[in-house]
Structures are given as C-alpha cells and as structure tokens.
Amino acid sequence: MLADHQGRLYGFIRSLMGADAGIEDVLQNTNRVLWEKASTFTPGTNFRAWAFQIARYQVLQFRAKQQREGIMIPFSNELLESLAILAGEKESAYERRRKFLKMCLEKMPPRQRDVIEKRYFERLSVTSISEALGIKPNAVSQLLFRGRENLLHCIESQMPGDSPINSSEF
C-alpha cells in the first residue's frame, strides 16, 4: 500500500509546501514513520487518510524545524491546515471518480473499451491502434471521441450532487 500511494503522498505534501526544496525530505520522513508505525494501521481502514495524516504532521515538523533555524515560513499553520483539508477533499473526489471510471469502463461496448484502453492505458498512438485493429485512423478517432463522451456521461450520472466533471480532468 505504501508503494501504491507514493505519487499521491508526494502530491499531498507538495500541495502543503508549494515548491519548497524540502518536499523530498518530508516524503522520506513520512515513509519512514509509516513504516515504523505499520503495526498500528488497521487493515481494512482508509490507508490513504492515515498516511496523509502522518504526512501532514511531518510537514508541520519540517516547518517547525525551519522556524527554529530562522528560515522564513511563507504562510501560517492555520492556512496549512486549511490546505490539508482541501487537498484531502480533492483526493477523495479523485478516488471516487477513479472508482466510477473503472465501473463505467466495464459497462462500455467491448470495441470502445479496447480502443480507450489501448490509447490511455497502453499509450498507443491512433495510428498504432488503427494498425493493430485493422481499421482506419478516423474510425479510431471516432471511437475515442464516443468512448470519452460515454465515460463522462456515465461518471457524471454516478456522482449525483457533485459538481460536473470537466472532461479535461481525464
């Protein structure tokens, strides 16, 4: 689980620290603490929330160390707490969209799903997909367009009450 969450942990820490050069140090300390406290994590509970909480504390410790060393801290801890809450909410929304994306992909017509997977998971070009499937590039482009539209509508229908999803988020 720790390895699976490295990208998200890095993003969370960066959202709290901005472009600070200490991001890698905080991530490393967070990983160390997560490893040391692994026995306190309850399997089946929210690992991401637990890891983000530890990361938040590591950011606060890093900032306290900077203050002790006389380094100017660009914003207050209260603002940091607000940023942590917002980042956690964004991450939760991301996880929900990801879950719905997986479910909606499973519902797609097989040919559309195959083209979407080849383009976005395998990162093949339209030309490569065209050659692999024996269809014209324009047909691949149309399948991609329809597939993206279907995914967007499917995901939006699964998330009542959430703000509409911007297709650029995909």
Image: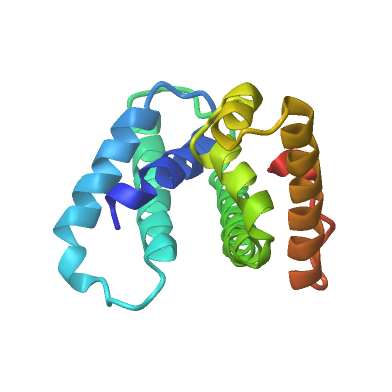
Furthest residue in direction front, as rendered:
134
Relative horizontal placement of residue 103, taking residue 51 as reference (left or right): right
Q: What's the residue at 54%, 32% (across, down)?
A: 132
Locate residue 106: give its quadrant.
bottom right
Relative horizontal placement of residue 154, taking residue 125 as reference (left or right): right
**Front-lying residue, 99 or 45:** 99
Locate residue 74: give its quadrant.
top right
| Residue 74 in sight in this render | no
Marks counted in the figure total 0
Q: Is the residue 58 above or below the residue 23 in the image?
A: below
Q: What's the residue at 75%, 47% (across, down)?
A: 148
Q: How is the image coloured?
A: rainbow
**Front-lying residue, 169 or 140:** 140
Instruction: Check the picture and name the quadrant holding the C terminus.
Output: top right
**Front-lying residue, 71 or 149:** 149
Give how far across and how far down residue 141 sits, in percent: 76, 33
| Residue 88 in sight in this render | yes
Q: What's the residue at 57%, 55% (across, down)?
A: 91
Q: Is the residue 82 above or below the residue 25 in the image?
A: below
Give how far across and how far down residue 50 sits, in percent: 38, 64
Give how far across and how far down residue 46 sits, in percent: 41, 70
Q: What's the residue at 18%, 54% (across, down)?
A: 35
Instruction: Check the picture and name the quadrant holding the N terminus.
Output: bottom left
Locate residue 70: give its quadrant.
top left
Give how far across and how far down residue 117 sits, in percent: 56, 45
Relative horizontal placement of residue 44, taking residue 153 as reference (left or right): left
Q: Is the residue 92 above or below the residue 139 in the image?
A: below
**Front-lying residue, 74 or 34:** 34
